[in-house]
RNA sequence: UCCGGGAUCGUUCAAUGGUAGGACACCAGCUUUUGGAGCUGGUCAUGGGGGUUCGAAUCCUCCUCCCGGAACCA
């Protein structure tokens, strides 16, 4: 059997032959082959505006928009705003900002489920007239009791057999604000003994006298998710309606409504949501972290929210590549957070300018270097990118080096500075540690060194100096604050806890270290929020919005790979 | 307990009855004025039992384990 002659314009295999198709692309190819939706692909990203987007949403956003792009189709943005008690305009703005920042464009296709309320209402009437829906007066508690349990079927509501006329009248009066919250609902009449709870006469409309962020006080009845989502997809002529696994049980109901209403019927497809090691991923838990002060807000650089990652310094490119890399499947999986960290390393390695910054300063006096001499050394801005050029870095008699680049009693294989030892100053000379100055308490105050003037840009002939360390001039350094962020949790699976505890038990108490007295090279004097750099030998850093004219503030995005730490750990 | 899903290197994604492969991680080496980057090589996997077949990760069957579901939330 051959289907090569049936390939069509949107066939992704010809676009990228190496990359295997994921299961959604296979389904789409099938639709294209059979012509179920003609030759179009139209997806949508349907957030509820009740919180901030996180990296898990990014996976869904990237999936929906990329699929549309790949097949030459479109992707809508639709706010699923059917619950006025939880939703706010503020979230609409933040969601749009985040999607735009990620680099996706819904053009003019910004929709709201609330725009469809009138259509939904008349579809509900249609179902009532066809005998497929009824008004039920059971209380929420009784509705639950009538629904049955995992092993027992439900029982029919005493209101299940009301006449069409009575149902129509009651439903109209529900809309007319005649009844208080919780007194009546509209239910679909399906099957109270169905093994799938969603089919046991699900609620379609509830009474909610609440102000809606868009429709104001026009409505006091609001449709439920199940009577909104598929219908909205249908109105927008969506072809593949992609959602997460927990909606799998809702698909029969999605299909039931489309069939009974006899409207355009998209295919719902479920995939596994993203989980990350060392991370929690739920709005409720984010709220706990924010409210209980474990972090400083939704955009705290330790949060896996899009705004948090953005503030941390992640690039949208790296997040998109991450989403592409992890793929899409139905297995419940937990992606190693190092995959995300590697994506930002890879991107920033290619584009971030290199600079020198001393996080924990230790003063070094170079005794044989003249007191008032300033030497301009040339430093390469980015060895990965020739076009980035070079810059001058001032070298003076007094410099700072990092405290952990000196060991009074060096361990084995340590090839940085130690008494009597030599080390290369990055882009500069080789220096030798002649003596260590301490205070009465025995703390190291400064190092006295000598430099070898014949080592600039060349190796000495008689000896080999392997270590290279970064440094800044004492006179010309700029004071900076550096915020060293680490993982928010100490364990891979923060939700795995002992009896009686919750994820808070696994919070990393050292997820933020404040270094208020860092010294950075003078070229970093006028940095602006959002700029990203590699601090040589240390890591990638971004300029935080807290930066002021007098003091730059840097966030550590991610450390450089640290092979030395691994060696040190092993020995 | 009932229904719906899922199970392949440490992790993630492939292999669609025909040599179980890639990436990350890990290990070893080369290179290096970032213990960064790069390059080369290597270790490691089909949840279990039966069956069909010349041949099974793939088909059948029984079992085990994991996830989701009983909001007038989405």
Image (cartoon, coloured by chain):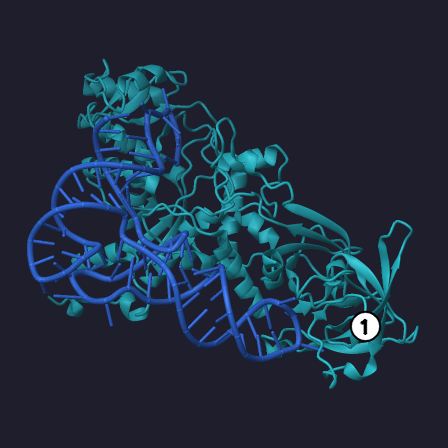
Chain colours: A cyan, B blue
Chain letter of mark 1 equals A
Residue at (31% x, 62% y) in the render? A71
Image check: A310 left or right of B3? right
User: Residue A538: x percent and y percent?
Assistant: 66, 62
> Would you place residue A491 above or below residue A367 in this image?
above
Residue farthest to the top, as pictured = A158
Q: Is residue A104 visible?
A: no
Residue A428's quadrant in the figure? bottom right
User: Residue A203: x percent and y percent?
Assistant: 30, 26
Image check: A137 left or right of A98? left
Q: Name the residue under label 1.
A: A432
Residue A424's quadrant in the figure? bottom right
Numbered disc 1: secondary structure: strand
Front-lying residue, A201 or A105: A201
Residue A74's quadrant in the figure? bottom left
Tally of numbered discs: 1
Q: In which quarter of the image is the N terminus of chain A?
A: bottom left
Residue at (64% x, 58% y) in the render? A530
Front-lying residue, A185 or B27: B27
User: Residue A358: x percent and y percent?
Assistant: 75, 61
User: Residue A217: x percent and y percent?
Assistant: 46, 28
Front-lying residue, A55 or A342: A342
Image check: A405 left or right of A190? right
> Would you place residue B36 above or below residue B64 in this image?
below
């Amino acid at each position: 059997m051959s289907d090569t002659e049936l390939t069509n314009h949107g066939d992704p295999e010809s676009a990228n032959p190496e990359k295997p198709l994921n299961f959604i692309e296979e389904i789409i190819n099938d639709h294209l082959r059979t012509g179920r939706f003609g030759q179009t692909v139209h997806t949508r990203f349907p957030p509820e505006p009740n919180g901030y987007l996180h990296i898990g949403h990014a996976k869904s956003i990237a999936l929906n928009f990329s699929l549309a792009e790949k097949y030459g189709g479109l992707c809508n943005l639709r706010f699923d705003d059917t619950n006025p008690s939880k939703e706010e305009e503020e979230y609409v703005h933040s969601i749009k900002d985040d999607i735009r920042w990620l680099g996706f464009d819904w053009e003019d296709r910004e929709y709201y489920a609330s725009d469809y309320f009138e259509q939904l209402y008349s579809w509900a009437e249609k179902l009532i007239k066809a005998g497929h829906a009824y008004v039920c007066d059971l209380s929420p508690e009784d509705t639950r009791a009538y629904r049955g349990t995992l092993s027992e079927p439900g029982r029919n509501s005493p209101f299940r057999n009301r006449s069409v006329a009575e149902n129509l009248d009651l439903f109209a009066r529900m809309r007319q604000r005649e009844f208080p919250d919780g007194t009546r609902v509209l239910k679909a009449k399906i099957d109270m003994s169905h093994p799938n709870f969603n089919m046991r006469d699900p609620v379609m409309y509830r009474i909610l006298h609440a102000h809606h962020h868009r429709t104001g006080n026009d409505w006091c009845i609001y449709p439920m998710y199940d009577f909104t989502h598929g219908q909205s997809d249908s109105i927008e002529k969506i072809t593949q309606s992609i959602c997460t696994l927990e909606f799998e049980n809702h698909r029969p109901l999605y299909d039931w409504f489309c069939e009974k209403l006899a409207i355009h019927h998209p295919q719902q497809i479920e995939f596994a949501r993203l989980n990350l090691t060392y991370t929690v991923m739920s709005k409720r838990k984010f709220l706990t972290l924010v409210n209980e002060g474990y972090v400083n807000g939704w955009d705290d650089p330790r949060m896996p929210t899009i705004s948090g990652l953005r503030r941390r310094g992640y690039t949208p490119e790296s997040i998109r590549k991450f989403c592409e890399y992890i793929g899409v499947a139905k297995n419940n999986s937990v992606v190693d957070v190092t995959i995300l960290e590697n994506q930002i390393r890879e991107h920033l390695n290619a584009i971030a300018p290199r600079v020198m910054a001393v996080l924990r300063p230790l003063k070094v006096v170079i005794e044989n270097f003249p007191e008032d001499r300033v030497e301009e050394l040339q430093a390469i801005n980015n060895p990965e990118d020739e076009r980035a050029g070079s810059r001058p870095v001032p070298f003076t008699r007094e410099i700072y080096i990092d405290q952990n680049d000196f060991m009074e009693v060096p361990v084995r294989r340590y090839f940085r500075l130690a008494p009597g030892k030599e080390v290369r100053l990055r882009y500069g000379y080789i220096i030798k540690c002649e003596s260590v100055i301490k205070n009465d308490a025995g703390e190291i105050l400064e190092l006295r060194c000598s430099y070898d003037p014949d080592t600039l840009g060349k190796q000495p002939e008689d000896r080999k100096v392997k270590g290279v360390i970064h440094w800044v001039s004492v006179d010309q350094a700029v004071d900076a604050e550096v915020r060293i962020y680490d993982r928010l949790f100490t364990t891979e699976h923060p939700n795995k806890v002992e009896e009686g505890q919750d994820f808070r038990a696994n919070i990393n108490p050292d997820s933020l270290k404040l270094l208020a007295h860092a010294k950075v090279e003078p070229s970093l004097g006028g940095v602006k929020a959002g700029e990203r750099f590699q601090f040589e030998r240390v890591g990638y850093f971004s300029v935080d919005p807290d930066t002021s004219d007098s003091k730059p503030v840097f966030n550590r995005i991610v450390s450089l790979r640290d092979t030395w730490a691994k060696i040190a750990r092993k020995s």
